[in-house]
Image (spheres, grey):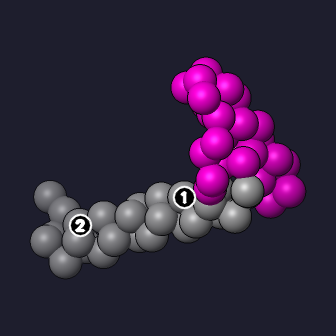
Amino acid sequence: MIAAGRLRRRVLQERNVAEQAINRLKNVRAVATRYDERAYIFLGNATLAALIIWLRS
């Protein structure tokens, strides 16, 4: 069984990774401003931004 301290640290590490990913997506103007009228266009922009971020890292 995992000790409570280790589990908490693991949860905080995973949360940090998720927050960093969201902040990177917010740096892309099309995702941050969300001027798109349709949800599927916004989803496409967010997916493209995530792909570009992933390829650069």
Q: Is residue 54 visible?
A: no
Label 2–label 1 contact, CB within 8 A: no
Number of numbered discs present?
2
Image quarter (top left, top right, bottom left or bottom right) of the C terminus: bottom right
Instruction: Tell me the element at label 1.
Output: helix
Q: Is residue 16 left or right of residue 50?
A: left
Earlier in the chain: of badge 2 and badge 1, it is: 2
Instruction: Tell me the element at label 2.
Output: helix
Pick whichever, 24 or 17, lies toward us: 24
> Where, by quadrant of the figure, is residue 12 drawn?
bottom left
Q: Main secondary structure of the magenta part?
A: helix
Is residue 56 a member of the stretch shown in magenta? yes
Please give the name of the residue rendered at 62% of the width and 56% of the height, measured from the top-left corner.
Answer: 32
Please give the name of the residue rendered at 71% of the width and 36% of the height, measured from the top-left corner.
Answer: 45
Label of residue 48 in the image: none
Above or below 53: residue 17 = below
Amino acid carrying mark 2 in the image: Leu
The label nearer to you, 2 versus 1, is 1
Please give the name of the residue rendered at 60% of the width and 29% of the height, measured from the top-left corner.
Answer: 37
Above or below 34: residue 7 = below
According to the image, label 1 marks what residue? 22
Report the span colored magenta: 30-57
Amino acid carrying mark 1 in the image: Ile
Image position, residue 3 (x, y; %): 15, 70
> Where, by quadrant of the figure, is residue 21 drawn?
bottom right
Is residue 43 a member of the stretch shown in magenta? yes
Mark 2 residue crowding within 10 angstroms, few (<14) / some (14–19) / many (20+): few
According to the image, label 2 marks what residue? 7
Q: Is residue 40 visible?
A: yes
Pick whichever, 57 or 52, lies toward us: 52
Image position, residue 38 (x, y; %): 59, 24
Mark 1 residue crowding within 10 angstroms, few (<14) / some (14–19) / many (20+): few
